[in-house]
Image (cartoon, rainbow, N blue to C red):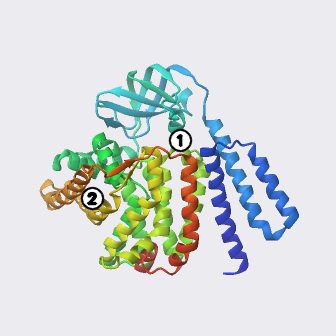
Amino acid sequence: MNLGNILLSKALLFSSSSFIVGIFLSSFVGIGKEFFLLFFIIAISLLICFRSPVFLVSLIFIFIGIGVFWFNTFDQQHRQEARSLSFFKGVISEEIENRGDRSRIIISGIDEFEEEKLLIFIRNHSSYQYGDILEVRGIIQSPKPFDDFDYPGYLAKDGIYLTIINPEITLIGNRVSYKNTILKYKERARSFLNQGLPYIHSSIVSAMLLGDKWAIPNNWKEKMSNTGTRHIVAVSGLHIAVMAAIAVAFSKIIGLYGKKSLFFIITVVFLFILITGFQPSAIRAGIMGLSLIVASFFGRINNSLRVILITAALMLSLNPILLRYDIGFQLSFLAVIGIVLFSSLLQDKMRFLPAIIRDVLAMSLSAYIFTFPLLIYYFGNISLVFPITNILIVPVLYIVMILGILFIFLSFFSSTLALVALFPLWLFVSWIIAVIQFFSKIGWSSMLIEWTNSLSITIFYGAVILFVWKKSLSMIKNSKNSIGFYIEKNI
């Protein structure tokens, strides 16, 4: 690589990283857009005083300033003034979530409400479908914060600025699209799982494969948090990486290598996102996961971090408030970085395990280690048994995903044929449930943490970055066991 390419590569890395840092500072520290001028002045001053040797340093300050300016500008543009309406007409634009005794419906406005979205809560399960055109009447208001939670910002990340509870609804039409078909097949898949498995079993598999995390009862969510296993049911960058590892193994079996294998892996990941109904969180996780896969194919694993940071910067350039309000984006981003930085370190300690189990286990533990401070920040507790529970559960994680997909696929053709996958699926999910149940009953399985804040999280990740810079990057460059190398050498 010539000097020009090296400088361009470093410039892309530093500018992307700095842009993310700028958005982070505005999101969590509260730096206003007026600080953009300060960062810009610092950058210009450095260039005037020191010239070329500080070009990259100046670039850092410029893009931190751009990130600060862009977040504040975007946030102000998309935070509408508190308002009230009595009428709204729109089309159901997302899959309806039937949660317990109520339904959650999102409609995108048409006619005079074309740029807006309305979140509807109604009692009982909804009989409406994706694509239905509704007229809604009632007290429609801008969402309000509650219990120190920025609910308006949380909804704004998905473009929602209005809410209503138990309105009067009139069905006036329907728009048919490809997504109607996808969601119908997804509903059938959900039905197959519900009919074939006990409730807890089906809710776990549905969350893992269909993105139905809302289907898991709250008491089980708490058990998973206490045992450090909640990440296994949230579609994230980890799941995409696991699906990629499965696809790599399967492509070797059917004799695919090189670009054909890469195309097969991307197709598998795409189909996985498809069966979730193209949920925004699954799409974002898919983008993060695919950035790791593609980087592993076209370059050594030490380039993967650069590609991931550039990908994240591009996603945040489209919607910078994701970094502040989308927990799924935060976890996917950190999980994939954790996989890149730590998986090779852990795999060296697990050489006695079969390759695919070692890779999946190392990925899971790496992702959890790098995301657990964020989990503490949001959920307030840390699992003390997560190394044990993950060692016991993760080796069967990819088996459950394979069997679950196989069961759903066969169910579309023959319920009798699907029984081939049903019993082993039930058996492995029962193992996951038994592990979670057993360790959640231990009194010291988790510890409540009340002192976390943005500063403590920043200090933690700063310390991790310094550690990685000194210890891990050299191992990543030379590693023969990292997930990136595993993908690269097999395709």
Look at mark 2 in the image and give the residue it sits on.
Answer: 405
Which secondary structure, mark 2?
helix
Compared with 261, 26 (above or below) is: above
Residue 287 is at least partly visible in this image: no
Q: Count neighbours of disc 2 (C-alpha within 10 A) and say few if under 14, some if 14 to 19, many if 20 or more.
A: many
How far apart are labels 1 and 2 at the CA level?
31 Å
Where residue 65 sits: x, y (%)? 72, 51
Image side of residue 242 versus residue 286, left or right? left
Compared with 368, 224 (above or below) is: above
Compared with 165, 38 (above or below) is: below
Where residue 228 sits: x, y (%)? 35, 54
Compared with 176, 277 (above or below) is: below
Instruction: Identify which residue, 6 or 228, lies in the foreground.
Output: 228
Where residue 21 sits: x, y (%)? 63, 54
In the image, farthest residue toward the right: 48
In the image, farthest residue toward the front: 444
What kind of residue is marked 2?
Ile
Look at mark 1 in the image and give the residue it sits on.
Answer: 157
